Image (cartoon, helix red, strand yellow):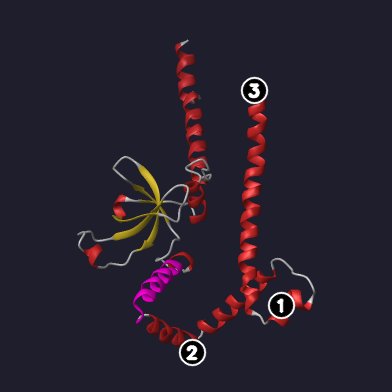
């Protein structure tokens, strides 16, 4: 039974990640292929070629995203976006959903200090327990000002194994520790529940330096050797 259990676990460790990866890829391909429905029926791949090509919708979706990005990146496009957003801001339910999704997208995919580009260690849910959190903003508003702190960092504390849910906390910069980990490595550690621990080069350097110091302590100096020889 022990041998059977070992072989079974070894097989699961091989096929389970592979199966989940294939299923996720199939889902994404089918999702993006729906963009082909935007084309007229006569210009779709099955009508022109006589058969369907899986994944062709990814190219169409990528082309659409790049085209819209080129249009909104210039002055005229940004002005049109402001007009469109002011129109959506007048619709009660749509306004809340659109602005919330836009702010999250800007935090995840944007650039600058107000993004998910920094990982921190924070004591949560109590002092003495540490977890990983991601910076969302450093802007000062009423909530940050009423804390009485000079420099407040807005942090998102994700849950394991689903990092899309979590908690929002505000902490003083003096009470958190900035990590050298990038966001991707920090997310891997969160999703795995601490099983996946990314290597840290500085830790290796510190261990080597400590081992070198211990080695030097065991080597007698020249003066000690001379003193011992005289005494003998």
Label 3: few (<14), some (14–19) or many (≥20) C-alpha neighbours in 10 Å: few
Q: Which residue is mark 2?
A: 76
Choose the circle earlier in sequence order: 2 or 3: 3
Could you say whether the residue bearing mark 3 is in a helix, strand or loop?
A: loop
Q: Are marks 2 and 3 in contact (CB under 8 Å)?
A: no
Nearest to the eye among marks 2 and 1: give it: 1
Could you say whether the residue bearing mark 1 is in a helix, strand or loop?
A: loop
Question: How many marks are shown on the rendered structure?
Answer: 3
Q: Which residue is mark 1?
A: 44
Choose the circle earlier in sequence order: 3 or 1: 3
Residue 144, which numbered label?
A: none
Nearest to the eye among marks 2 and 3: give it: 3
**Residue range highlighted in magenta:** 90-106
Residue 31 spot, x, y in % from top left? 61, 66
| Residue sitting at the far bottom | 76
Q: CA distance from mark 2 to mark 3?
A: 70 Å
Residue 170 spot, x, y in % from top left? 29, 57
Could you say whether the residue bearing mark 2 is in a helix, strand or loop?
A: helix
Residue 79 spot, x, y in % from top left? 44, 87
Residue 93 higher or lower than 6, as above or below = below
- Which residue is at a point 72% across and 81% down the rendered structure image? 43
Observer-nearest of 104 and 213: 104
Q: Are marks 3 and 1 in contact (CB under 8 Å)?
A: no
- Which residue is at a point 34% across and 41% down the rendered structure image? 129
Q: CA distance from mark 3 to mark 1?
A: 55 Å
Q: Are marks 2 and 1 in contact (CB under 8 Å)?
A: no
Label 1: few (<14), some (14–19) or many (≥20) C-alpha neighbours in 10 Å: some
Quadrant hosting residue 141: bottom left
């Amino acid at each position: 039974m022990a041998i059977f259990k070992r072989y079974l676990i070894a097989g699961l460790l091989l096929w389970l990640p592979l199966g989940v990866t294939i299923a996720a890829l199939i889902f994404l391909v089918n999702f993006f292929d729906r963009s082909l429905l935007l084309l007229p029926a006569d210009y779709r791949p099955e009508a022109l070629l006589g058969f369907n090509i899986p994944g062709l919708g990814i190219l169409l979706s990528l082309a659409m995203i790049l085209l819209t990005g080129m249009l909104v990146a210039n002055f005229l496009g940004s002005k049109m976006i402001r007009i469109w957003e002011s129109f959506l801001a007048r619709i009660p339910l749509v306004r809340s959903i659109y602005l919330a999704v836009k702010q999250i997208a800007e935090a995840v995919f944007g650039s600058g200090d107000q993004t998910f580009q920094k990982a921190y260690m924070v004591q949560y849910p109590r002092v003495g327990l540490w977890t990983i959190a991601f910076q969302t903003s450093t802007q000062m508003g009423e909530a940050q000002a009423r804390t009485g702190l000079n420099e407040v960092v807005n942090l998102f504390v994700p849950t394991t194994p689903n990092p899309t849910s979590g908690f929002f906390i505000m902490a003083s910069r003096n009470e958190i520790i900035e990590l050298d980990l990038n966001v991707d490595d920090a997310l891997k550690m969160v999703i795995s529940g601490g099983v996946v621990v990314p290597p840290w080069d500085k830790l290796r350097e510190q261990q080597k330096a400590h081992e070198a110091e211990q080695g030097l302590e065991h080597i007698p100096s020249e003066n000690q050797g001379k003193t011992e020889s005289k005494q003998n």
